[in-house]
Image (cartoon, grey):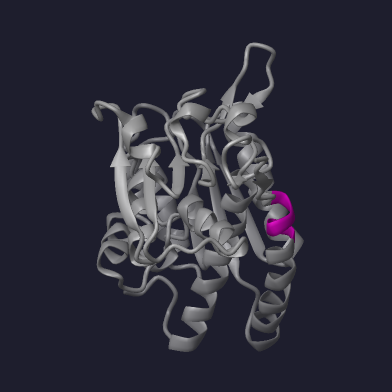
Amino acid sequence: MSAQIIDGVALSRNLRQEMTGRVAGLAATKRPPGLAVILVGEDPASQVYVRNKVRACEEVGIHSVMERHPADISQEQLCARIALLNEDRSIDGILVQLPLPRHIDAQAVVESIAPTKDVDGLQIHSAGALMTGSAGFKPCTPYGVMKMLEHVGVTLKGSRAVVIGRSNTVGKPMALLLLQQNATVTICHSGTPDIAAHTRQADIVVVAVGRRDTLTASMVKPGAVVIDVGINRREDGKLCGDVDFAGVSEIASWITPVPGGVGPMTITMLLANTIESAERTLAAGSKPGAL
């Protein structure tokens, strides 16, 4: 067996093309959606991520504002700036690029964003909405994974899914989203004695731990769908994921590559959440940022 590739680049391109119509409709009705991206410090990787997000906004017609702040900005100053963006009627989503400098409490900063503008889906409010099935914003990476599974027609109801990783940004919300679709979900992590015993029974495996070769061919059931959320760098400088791609692709039915898999979908779902925020505001006819 040789796995088929779930192409995140191609799927992102198609989804973004569809988004342009929704954005044009909002622009014609009132105004285009607006996203504010905040970058603190000079971390090279963060600068690349922010540029990619701003470029994606331009691609679909979303109004974007990129704010740069020095690494020594105080937490109070940063939260004060976010408070102003909360009241800005042209802004539907606010994203603070992580990580932040050590002297800043990142969660406190995220919590200072109005819940209606938490398009990254990282607030406790958003986590609670996901847990209870209420209206909220899904974290972008798990949201993107769900779109990929939907795109290739994976049946989730009744399937056995294993998520390796328990982070608040990927692992936990990923498990909840799969559970919402009636999959039977197991979360494995560093405290799990025998991860392979679980993955060998799984129809779907999502790996998100940030460590090379976490999932190898001997750990995968033939025909399983494997989603690689990890991103690492090999000794030669090339990017790779958490999955032994060469080996696992001979066993799985579908697999995501790194790069070109989940990564592009994360930014695409950020755009989707921003558009949804603008549509909600328009439908409600309420002041942006209001609870």
Of residues 85 and 97, the one drawn nearer to the viewer in this rendering: 97
Q: Is residue 176 visible?
A: yes
- Picture layout, residue 245 above or below residue 88: above
In percent of width and height, residue 8 lies at 66, 50
Q: Which quarter of the rendered picture does the N terminus lie within?
A: top right
How many numbered callouts?
0
Identify the residue at image location x=62%, y=36%: 249
Identify the residue at image location x=53%, y=44%: 227
- Picture layout, residue 113 above or below residue 18: above
- Picture layout, residue 89 above or below residue 137: below
In percent of width and height, residue 131 lies at 27, 62
Q: Is residue 285 visible?
A: no
Membership of 248 in magenta stretch: no
- Picture layout, residue 21 above or below residue 165: below
Of residues 163 and 160, the one drawn nearer to the viewer in this rendering: 160
> For the magenta stretch, what is the residue range?
9-13
Membership of 12 in magenta stretch: yes
In percent of width and height, residue 31 lies at 64, 79
The reply, left or right, for residue 74 in relation to residue 68 is: left
Q: Which quarter of the rendered picture does the C terminus lie within?
A: bottom left
Considering the whole magenta stretch, tell me its main secondary structure: helix
Identify the residue at image location x=31%, y=73%: 134
The reply, left or right, for residue 274 in relation to residue 159 is: right
Of residues 215 and 290, the one drawn nearer to the viewer in this rendering: 215
Farthest residue, direction top? 235
Identify the residue at image location x=57%, y=33%: 248
